């Protein structure tokens, strides 16, 4: 398995190279630059001076080579939007906050989604099942920023239990974590329910019951374990998605995290940040899929990694 | 017995413990006898209903030693909390379009300053003279003014500031170019060294500025001459990153930056070294970085003390509707007209807008009143001119009828132009620049009016700032392209008749050889307009004559339908009712504003009171 993991990691290098080239070319294609023009557009001379300031006056291939030579030394350059911070520094400053929010949301999502899915499956077509379905559907269909605004309206403005935003105290964490966890909670609950129901109808479950195993053993040893295999495929990508943040949640609740940079770096033409984030996302996705593949081995003894 | 009484006894003991704990927390702790001299200088202000206590009350004094009015709340309450967007730079000399809050409240102070009537008043420069030929200005500086590190603010700093502003990668360079300072463009382009700029030190507290031609409004421009500390910045070409180093935190304004937490907040405190005309009243200012959409809920939840009054939509139409429906909230609202105009413009050098009748038809087909009553409710007043009401040289009343709403006339003009009922007219795209939802809605309404009144199909495209600017630039540079119909605002830079007409032209250098090289930012050109603007700019000491010339120029602009003015915005702000001070004194028109551009520091004119305003 070690060899398999190493091979997969090595295979990531050409993927990242190609991805960086495509991203580099695309982001430079978009008009504008990392400067703001006010009421009057810059003259050609001023634009030339600005391009020189940011090193954008060189041919694109040269800019790429300069960038890639920095990356080899783990230097992703300085952020254009935050001129006093390197890309690595900026990500190091903001990502822990986002990861903190994401992990708490993940805990809440799994902590509620899994039991809800299991209950709904076991009590299929009961009022409990319908209630879980209703909650899950609401979690699905309403975007988290709508939940966020709704929560602010109810819990901050009406009930005055918590502030409208901020990230300094645990009281300020409650609403963003809740709003952020609803959609993944719904995903987890729905897929868990569907997967368990499917496994519960399998022949080997009927056999387990026929040979006299107790319902508890049937559920824990046969149903849940087998139901986990398809769920791994669904749950895996939830992790990088949640720990890289959401611009909406972070903006609505004033969370000083990484989430907004996924969008603002493009608007600001912060090229080093755009490509830095793209690389981060690619690595996270690749590692997540790798971990998921490894977990399959533990969940299903029939699977072997070669 | 044990079993029978154990539980009630336990509950009783528990309740007693809780009661003791609560009482222990709430009851005043025994105080040791204190000599009267040991009393704190600032005591909580007594309620006005207890006059007997008033004589013993010590005045509230902030950390800069400023004594606040008798009704001031205790010093720990003299804090203002704002919500702002985090920007890239810290200071005015780095960028004017992407800088954090605090530029001219803390970092810098200006040569002159406008009063409530926008007339230049002394500030760092206490007086100024113009030479007989109108080309040389001499500025005399206040000798007692110092930076927060105690070093004097001198003429060296002022000359350095101008040299620093004359650099090519500075986004506000264009503004200072309007001062016509000798060799400005050559210094910007690097053809001449900065020492050859027409700004010279005479002695430590006197400097001169020489201009290419008489520039009667130079003292107004110098209200935005925000001094840069030469002894700290040193390199005039520094990109602005000098201000990120805490060792360089040197301030000229009434406040100073105490801390900057990236992604979270800026904290300013009163500058005890400030000795200018606007000593700080508020003791502390906390600027939290937050999205514009979150400010109204935060204000309602008492997490912010004032919102709005700027260029972001802190108070969207839904918030305004809520405010207007509540007498209590309405009392906290401050609204005032801004010198700004939103307008439609065309590429008048190409078909179909090279035809005056087409432009006239468009101007008569837009019902501004409907826009104001609908999507732009509470946000503006109908506009028919570039210069807004009250602006020097304005002709609002005289020109109002030139582009009045007249759908029948609009249809007739389209017919005369060869497009009866819009037949044969190309489908248009109306480009917007990073427009807020209300403006997008207004644009949709305009598209509807154009379809209904003159049969023209218009689709809306809301572009990001850079792409819009790039398209506008290339349309003029190439004298053609697809950017033929767009909407944009223009806000005044300084209150002078020349200013709001300047996007449309200015002094021509040499004969007309290339339209794309003509002054102004739009694809419209008029020789007489440029001549009037240029000549009016050189009239010294006769404001009435200058303004009459600007009126003539604007008549040309409006009659030629270079633009279709839509509305002049009304700025709105919500300010907590316990905030009082000279900021709320009305100007000569009875208007109260919350516009920090008008003063060196708004926070020097407000304090928190125990009462309400």
Image (cartoon, coloured by chain):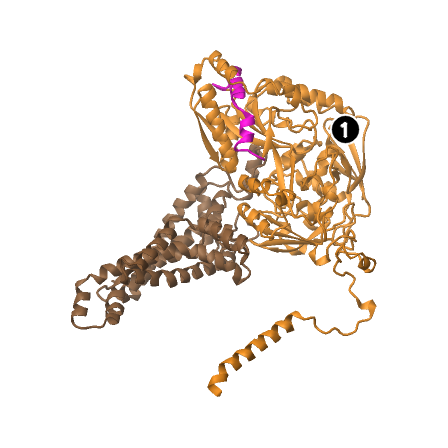
Observer able to see residue B42: yes
Between A89 and B33, the one nearer to me in the picture:
B33
Q: Is residue B375 left or right of residue B278?
A: left
Chain A colour?
brown
Q: Would you say residue B370 sits in the magenta stretch? A: yes
Q: Is residue B52 left or right of residue B237?
A: right
Residue B165 vs B407, above or below: the answer is below
**Which of the chains is orange?**
B
The span shown in magenta is B350-378
Between B260 and A177, the one nearer to me in the picture:
A177
- Residue drawn at x 68%, y 42% as measured from the top left: B596
Observer able to see residue B289: no
Please identify the quarter of the rendering in which residue B167 is found.
top right
**Looking at the picture, how far across and down is residue A49, in whole percent?**
57, 39
**Looking at the picture, how far across and down is residue B400, in whole percent?**
62, 21
Q: Is residue B41 left or right of residue A222?
A: right
Q: Would you say residue B555 sits in the magenta stretch? A: no
Residue B235 vs A48, above or below: the answer is below
| Mark 1, residue position | B135
Q: Residue furthest bottom?
A: B1
């Amino acid at each position: 398995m070690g060899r398999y993991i190493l091979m997969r990691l090595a295979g990531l290098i050409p993927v990242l190279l190609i991805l960086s080239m495509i991203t580099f070319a695309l982001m430079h294609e978009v008009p504008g630059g990392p400067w703001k023009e006010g009421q009057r557009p810059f003259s050609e001379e001023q634009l030339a001076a600005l391009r020189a300031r940011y090193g954008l006056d060189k041919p694109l291939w040269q800019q790429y080579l300069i960038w890639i030579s920095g990356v080899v030394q783990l230097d992703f350059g300085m952020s254009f939007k935050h001129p006093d911070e390197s890309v690595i520094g900026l990500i190091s400053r903001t990502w822990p906050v986002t990861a903190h929010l994401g992990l708490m949301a993940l805990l809440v999502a799994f902590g509620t989604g899994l039991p809800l899915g299991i209950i709904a499956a076991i009590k299929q077509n009961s009022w409990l099942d319908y209630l879980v379905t209703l909650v899950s559907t609401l979690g699905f269909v309403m975007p988290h920023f709508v939940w966020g605004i709704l929560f602010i309206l109810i819990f901050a403005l009406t009930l005055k239990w918590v502030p409208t935003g901020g990230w300094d105290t645990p009281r300020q964490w409650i609403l963003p974590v809740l709003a952020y966890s609803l959609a993944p909670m719904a995903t987890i609950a729905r897929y868990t329910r569907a997967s368990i129901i499917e496994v519960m109808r399998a022949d080997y479950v009927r056999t387990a019951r026929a040979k006299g195993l107790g319902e508890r053993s049937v559920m824990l040893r046969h149903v849940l374990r087998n139901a986990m295999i398809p769920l791994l495929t669904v749950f895996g990508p939830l992790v990088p998605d949640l720990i890289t943040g959401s611009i909406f949640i972070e903006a609505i609740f004033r969370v000083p995290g990484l989430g907004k940079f996924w969008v603002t770096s493009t608007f600001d033409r912060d090229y080093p940040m755009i490509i830095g984030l793209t690389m981060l996302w690619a690595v996270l996705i690749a590692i997540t899929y790798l971990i998921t593949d490894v977990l399959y081995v533990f969940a299903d003894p029939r699977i072997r990694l070669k | 017995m044990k079993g029978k009484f154990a539980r009630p006894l336990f509950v009783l003991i528990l309740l007693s413990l809780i009661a003791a704990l609560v009482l222990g927390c709430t009851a005043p702790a025994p105080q040791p006898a204190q000599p009267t001299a040991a009393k704190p200088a600032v005591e909580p202000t007594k309620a006005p209903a207890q006059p007997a206590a008033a004589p013993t009350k010590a005045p509230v004094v902030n950390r800069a030693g400023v004594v606040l009015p008798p009704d001031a709340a205790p010093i720990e309450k003299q804090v203002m909390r704002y919500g702002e967007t985090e920007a890239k730079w810290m200071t005015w000399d780095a960028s004017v379009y992407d800088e954090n809050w605090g530029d001219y409240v803390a970092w810098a102070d200006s040569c002159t300053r406008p009063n409530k009537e926008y007339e230049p008043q002394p500030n760092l420069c206490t007086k100024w003279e113009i030479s007989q030929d109108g080309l040389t200005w001499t500025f005399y500086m206040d000798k007692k003014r110092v930076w927060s590190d105690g070093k004097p603010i001198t003429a060296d700093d002022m000359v350095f500031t101008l040299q620093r502003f004359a650099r090519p990668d500075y986004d506000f360079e264009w503004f200072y170019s309007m001062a016509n300072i000798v060799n400005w463009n050559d210094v910007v382009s690097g053809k001449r060294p900065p020492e050859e700029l027409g700004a010279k030190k005479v002695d430590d507290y006197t400097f001169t500025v020489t201009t290419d031609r008489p520039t009667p409004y130079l003292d107004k421009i110098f209200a935005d001459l925000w001094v840069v500390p030469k002894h700290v910045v040193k390199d005039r070409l520094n990109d602005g990153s000098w201000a990120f180093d805490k060792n360089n935190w040197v301030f000229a304004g009434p406040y100073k930056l105490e801390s900057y937490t990236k992604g979270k907040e800026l904290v300013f405190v009163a500058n005890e070294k400030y000795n200018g005309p606007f000593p700080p009243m508020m003791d502390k200012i906390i600027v939290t970085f937050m999205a514009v959409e979150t400010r109204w809920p935060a204000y309602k939840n008492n997490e912010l003390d004032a919102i709005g009054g700027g260029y972001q939509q802190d108070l969207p139409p839904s918030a305004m509707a809520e405010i207007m429906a509540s007498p209590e909230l309405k009392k906290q609202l401050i609204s005032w007209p801004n010198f700004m105009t939103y307008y439609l413009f065309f590429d008048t050098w190409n078909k179909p807008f090279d035809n005056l009748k087409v432009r006239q038809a468009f101007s008569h087909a837009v019902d501004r009143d409907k826009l104001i009553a609908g999507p732009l409710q509470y946000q503006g007043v109908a506009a028919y001119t570039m210069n807004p009401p009250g602006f020097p040289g304005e002709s609002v009343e005289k020109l109002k009828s030139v582009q009045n709403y007249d759908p029948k006339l609009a249809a007739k003009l389209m017919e005369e132009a060869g497009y009866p009922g819009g037949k044969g007219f190309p489908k248009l795209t109306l480009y917007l620049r990073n427009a807020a939802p209300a403006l997008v809605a207004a644009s949709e309404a305009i598209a509807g009016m154009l379809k209904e009144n003159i049969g023209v199909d218009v689709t809306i495209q809301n572009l990001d700032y850079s792409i819009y600017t790039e398209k506008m630039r290339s349309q003029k540079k190439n004298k053609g392209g697809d950017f033929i119909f767009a909407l944009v605002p223009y806000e005044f830079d300084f209150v002078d008749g020349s200013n709001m007409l300047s996007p449309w032209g200015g002094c021509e250098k040499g004969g007309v050889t290339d339209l794309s090289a003509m002054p102004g930012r739009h694809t419209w050109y008029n020789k007489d307009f440029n001549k009037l603007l240029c000549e009016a700019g050189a009239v010294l000491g006769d404001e009435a004559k200058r303004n009459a010339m600007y009126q003539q120029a604007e008549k040309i602009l409006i009659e030629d339908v270079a633009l279709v003015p839509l509305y002049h915005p009304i700025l709105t702000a919500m300010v907590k009712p316990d905030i009082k001070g000279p900021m709320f004194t009305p100007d000569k028109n009875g208007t109260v504003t919350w516009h920090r551009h008008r003063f060196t520091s708004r926070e020097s004119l407000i304090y928190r009171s125990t009462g309400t305003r």
